[in-house]
Image: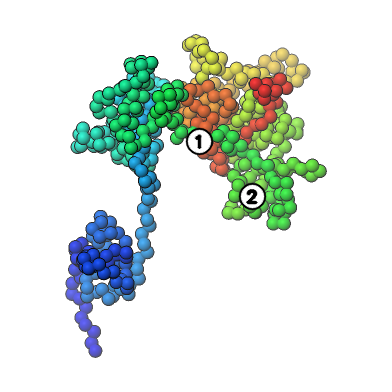
């Protein structure tokens, strides 16, 4: 039998309406006929397409891929089916009840300008007095002024996205995801009308905090079925709100950790049965004066790159090693250089305890570009860092100079403006640097007074003191940058400093999380905590928490009992 002639023209495509009319019925859904008669759908129907009829997905799919004509349907059935398209990332489903309404205090916006977009599916409300306070703080070059200006720009972008809606859009709320922040599924509401505020007679009506409290109380009366919560960084503001019976919360999104004790320490003690459990499958070799161990087992998932491990058992040789490689279920440990031995002294400084030995191994490692050291007062953070910096600048010529900076936050009353150049103004803040340089500049008695003076001049010629206020826009090449008192930095300031690093630069952050002097910063929201948590496990960074004080027996005892 001769074959039929091939078609002379291309088959016509069905319209979207024809596609819907000829599509197979949906599983679990009744057709129009079965809805009227109450009959169950046919059991042998095949589901061809997931989206519901008349949905935008079905219409777009029909227009995009088209449907073959009926005369070619038999051929199409035997053709291989395409793999399903990857599912789009679904947004976090809303709760069963109405979304909460968070009323933001001004200090929240000035602390984190992105706080508007941090409340997920919940809505945000801004009282008019909050906008007035933002307008009053927008002038200046401080961090607070910059944050106020950033919030104003974000509010302007949100309002510009609904220009066609006019004032009705402000009343109905501005969708927070209009400017690209897809994680914010709620709406932003402004106070567009006068609210009758009734507060207790003991609270003055003209104060901004009390007006915000009045707005929260009025919103709770207007929307009794909805949770209205005040969010403020001001402790006294939250106390007054609770005294009035108003729900209030702190702003938690800036906290990296809820508890400072959960912070990554950089070191881990190995279990006592480490050799028994890992000795049979362990591989070891020597290379470059170090011993390497390749281990596998349940301990590997808990390890991080550049994390230190130690095992000290009575009657056995201690093990001090660093994790240098993690591949699947295997990890490679490398023994350390023993800096407690005077032969390996760094600029005349030797490690006095286990953690100081770990810190010197990080500071002297050219592969580590970012190092964080934390610990109480007197643990040797600044001394070890300066010794390592001078050794690599003066002896190894790995870096050209040392740059020291810190946040100028006073402990007590501010003493006012300081005269002189930038380095002279930073002089009173660098007392710790001078004290440690005095220790590091000591030479033997044979050098005499001239030798000590020459050493001091040579050392100080390689150290530059810079102010934090002039760091934006700079790039440091082959520098050893020390950021002292880094616990007083905000996460945004920490990002500004770390991104100044150019090729060949090492940044070392020092700080004591128990001595935070910056307002609204805690152990969980400090920039130092933020950096430690974000950089852990990166192959070119390291962290160690110094545990034991070595300054003096008096300072060590005072840090424990006071």
539 horizontally vs 391: left or right: left
Q: Please report the residue visible at 19 percent of the width from the left and 68 percent of the height from the top.
A: 12
Instruction: Say above or below: 116 vs 416.
Output: below
Q: Quadrant of residue 515?
A: top right
Q: Quadrant of residue 242?
A: top left
Residue 52: x percent and y percent? 28, 59
Q: Please report the residue visible at 38 percent of the width from the left and 40 percent of the height from the top.
A: 120
Instruction: Say above or below: 485 vs 534.
Output: above
Q: Please report the residue visible at 50 percent of the width from the left and 13 percent of the height from the top.
A: 414
Quarter of the image that includes the C terminus:
top right
In the depicted view, which residue is nearer to us: 431 or 553? 553
527 horizontally vs 331: left or right: left
Quarter of the image that includes the N terminus:
bottom left
Residue 58: x percent and y percent? 26, 59
Residue 440: x percent and y percent? 68, 22
125 horizontally vs 448: left or right: left
Gap between marks 1 and 2 measured at Cα: 26 Å
In the depicted view, which residue is nearer to us: 390 or 93? 93
Does residue 228 appear anywhere in the picture?
yes
Task: Kindly state the secondary structure of the residue where label 2 is placed.
Answer: loop
For disc 1, the marked residue is 256
For disc 2, the marked residue is 299
Instruction: Estimate how packed mark 2 is, as few (under 14), some (14 to 19) or many (20 or more) residues with alpha carbons within 10 Å.
Output: some
Instruction: Estimate how packed mark 1 is, as few (under 14), some (14 to 19) or many (20 or more) residues with alpha carbons within 10 Å.
Output: many
**Which comes sooner in the sequence, label 1 or label 2?**
1
153 horizontally vs 438: left or right: left
Does residue 64 appear anywhere in the picture?
no
Look at the numbered discs 1 and 2 and tell me whether their residues touch, using CB distance below 8 Å. no
In the depicted view, which residue is nearer to us: 367 or 271? 271
Residue 382: x percent and y percent? 62, 25
């Amino acid at each position: 039998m001769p074959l039929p002639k091939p078609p002379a023209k291309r088959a016509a495509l069905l319209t979207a309406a024809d596609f819907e009319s000829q599509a197979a019925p949906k599983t679990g859904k009744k057709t129009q006929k079965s809805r009227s008669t109450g009959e169950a759908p046919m059991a042998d129907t095949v589901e061809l397409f997931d989206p519901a009829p008349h949905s935008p997905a079905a219409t777009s799919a029909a227009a995009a891929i088209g449907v073959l004509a009926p005369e070619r349907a038999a051929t199409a059935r035997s053709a291989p089916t395409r793999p399903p398209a990857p599912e789009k990332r679904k947004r976090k489903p809303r709760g069963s009840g109405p979304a909460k309404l968070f009323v933001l205090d001004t200090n929240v916006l000035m602390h984190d300008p992105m706080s508007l977009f941090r409340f997920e599916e919940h809505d945000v409300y801004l009282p008019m007095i909050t906008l007035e306070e933002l307008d009053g703080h927008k002038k200046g070059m401080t961090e607070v002024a910059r944050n106020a200006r950033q919030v104003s720009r974000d509010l302007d972008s949100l309002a510009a996205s609904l220009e066609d809606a006019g004032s009705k859009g402000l009343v109905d709320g501005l969708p927070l995801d209009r400017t690209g922040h897809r994680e914010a599924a709620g709406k932003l509401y402004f106070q567009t009308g006068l609210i009758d505020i009734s507060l207790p007679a003991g609270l003055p009506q003209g104060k901004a905090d009390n007006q915000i409290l009045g707005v929260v109380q009025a919103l709770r009366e207007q929307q009794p079925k909805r949770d209205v919560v005040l969010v403020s960084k001001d402790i006294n503001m939250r106390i007054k709100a609770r005294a009035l019976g108003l729900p209030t919360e702190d702003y938690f999104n800036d906290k990296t950790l809820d508890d400072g004790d959960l912070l990554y320490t950089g070191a881990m003690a190995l279990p006592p049965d480490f050799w028994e459990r890992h000795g049979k499958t362990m591989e070891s070799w020597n290379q470059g004066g170090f011993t390497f161990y390749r281990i596998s087992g349940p301990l590997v998932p808990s390890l991080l790159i550049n994390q230190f491990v130690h095992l000290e058992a009575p009657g056995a040789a201690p093990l001090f090693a660093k994790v240098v490689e993690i591949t699947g279920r295997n990890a490679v440990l490398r023994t350390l250089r023993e800096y407690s031995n005077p032969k390996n002294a760094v600029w005349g400084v030797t490690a006095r305890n286990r953690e100081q030995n770990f810190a010197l191994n990080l500071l002297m490692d050219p592969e580590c570009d970012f190092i964080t050291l934390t610990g109480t007062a007197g643990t040797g953070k600044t001394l070890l860092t300066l010794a390592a910096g001078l050794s690599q600048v003066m002896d190894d010529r790995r870096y050209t100079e040392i740059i020291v900076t810190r946040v100028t936050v006073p402990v007590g009353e501010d003493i006012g403006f300081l005269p002189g150049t930038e380095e002279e103004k930073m002089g009173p803040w660098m007392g710790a640097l001078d004290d440690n340089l005095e220790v590091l500049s000591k030479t033997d008695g044979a050098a005499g007074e001239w030798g000590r003076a020459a050493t001091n001049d040579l050392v100080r010629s390689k150290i530059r003191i810079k102010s934090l206020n002039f760091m934006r826009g700079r790039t440091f090449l082959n520098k050893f940058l020390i950021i002292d008192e880094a616990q007083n930095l905000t996460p945004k300031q920490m990002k500004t400093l770390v991104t100044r690093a150019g090729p060949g630069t090492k940044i070392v952050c020092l700080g004591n999380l128990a001595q935070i002097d910056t307002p609204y910063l805690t152990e969980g929201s400090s920039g130092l905590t933020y950096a430690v948590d974000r950089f852990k496990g990166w192959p070119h960074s390291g962290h160690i928490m110094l545990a034991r004080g070595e300054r003096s027996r008096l300072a060590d005892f005072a840090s424990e009992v006071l």
